[in-house]
Amino acid sequence: MPCNFQDDLALSKGPCQNRDAEILMAMIPRAISVSQSSLAADKNGVDYIVTLTRGAVLYVDAKTRRPGASKYWQESPDGQLVPDIALEKWSVKPSRGKKGKVGWTLCTQKKTDLVLYTFDPSDTPSAFLFSFQLLRMAFHKNLKEWFITYKHAPQDNVSWESEAVFVPVPVVQAAVVMVAEYSPTTTS
């Protein structure tokens, strides 16, 4: 079934907006407000602007999965379903000699500070917040392995195709920790 950007935008701006604001206020210490960004900022990866005490701001990109996403999740050894998150390789896949557009997860031009992943509460009430730059670095480092290991598929957007890979949250969290540490190699 084709994806519809306008439907996805309506979902993120409608029912999810209040919940996202509550989650961001709860997760970010010293946050004093969460405001919705302009449509122009939204197209550049900023859905919310979180203002902190003393005036600093954080730009947040919100990623919301549709209801029923949990039917694709893997089970952990204890039998619990493990949420996965979509990491986009291509916003527009190259085709027939046409140059593609790199996915948001790899984009070095984004002004995003944080990425908020939420799900329909029927799938899980959990939400996950990632530093965008650390997430981008982890995805860049693990891209080939994750496309071999995890489910990925083109998404039909009617006039173009995008492509994402669906990686379990604990795998992404571990990868983010790994790229956040520098350890020089010693030679003898």
Image: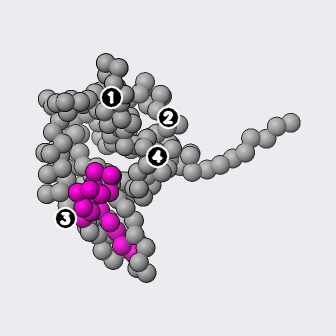
Asked if one can make out residue 26 in the rendered structure from this viewpoint, the answer is no
**Residue under pointer 3:** 18
Q: Amino acid at mark 1?
A: Lys
Disc 3 to disc 4, C-alpha distance? 29 Å
**Crowding near the residue tagged with mark 1, few <14, some 14–19, many ≥20 C-alpha atoms within 10 Å:** some
**Residue under pointer 1:** 93
* Colouring scheme, one of rainbow, by chain, secondary structure, one colour: one colour
Q: Earlier in the sequence, mark 1 or mark 4?
A: 1
Q: Secondary structure at mark 4?
A: loop
**Residue under pointer 2:** 142
Disc 4 to disc 2, C-alpha distance? 16 Å
Give the extent of the magenta segment: 36-52
Residue 17 placement: quadrant: bottom left
Q: Amino acid at mark 4?
A: Thr
**Crowding near the residue tagged with mark 2, few <14, some 14–19, many ≥20 C-alpha atoms within 10 Å:** few
Residue 65 placement: quadrant: top left
- Please give left or right for residue 31 compared with residue 134 in the image: left
**Residue under pointer 4:** 108
Disc 1 to disc 3, C-alpha distance? 33 Å
Q: Nearer the viewer, residue 2 or 178?
A: 2
Q: Secondary structure at mark 1?
A: loop
Residue at x 30% of width, y 40% of height? 81
